[in-house]
Image (cartoon, helix red, strand yellow):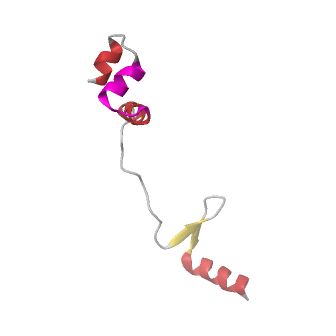
Amino acid sequence: MVNKYIEEGYNKTLVLKIVGLQRSTYYYNISNTKTIKTKPKGGKPKGYCIDKNNNKICDEKTKELILQAIE
């Protein structure tokens, strides 16, 4: 409804004030209508970690390295 009046040339601030909608809410909804929501990928990989070079390291090896660092 707000977009209809804004597209007709009415002042955006005035229309939002009359409707009782905050500008932040209006702009948030506009930005979300242009994007496609997808379910995020991932989660923690099971059984291994990934180092800086994207190499898989077994959890047991990681555990050993942590214990060595603690000692």
Please name the residue shown 56% across and 74% down the image: 58
Picture quarter containing residue 36?
A: top left
Q: Which residues are magenta?
A: 12-23
18 falls in the magenta region: yes
In the displayed structure, 16 sits above or below 4; it is below
Q: Position of residue 60 (x, y in %)?
A: 57, 81
Q: Position of residue 69 (x, y in %)?
A: 72, 82
User: Residue reaching furthest left?
Assistant: 1
Q: Main secondary structure of the magenta part?
A: helix
Q: Considering only vertical position in the picture, is 59 above or below 8?
A: below
Residue reaching furthest to the bottom: 71
Q: Closest to the observer: 39 or 33?
A: 33
Q: Is residue 50 left or right of residue 28?
A: right
Q: Does the stretch in magenta take in 43?
A: no
Q: Residue at x 36, y 42 (%)?
A: 37
Is residue 60 or residue 35 the one in the foreground? 35
Q: Residue at x 40, y 16 (%)?
A: 11
Q: Position of residue 4 (x, y in %)?
A: 28, 18
Q: Is residue 56 above or below residue 3?
A: below
Front position in the image: 47 or 11 = 11
Total marks drawn? Answer: 0
Query: Image point 42% across, 22% down: which residue?
Result: 13
Dividing the picture into quadrants, the one containing residue 26 is: top left
- Give the residue furthest to the top: 9
65 left or right of 5?
right
Answer with left or right where residue 64 lies relative to residue 45: right
71 vs 25, nearest the viewer:
25
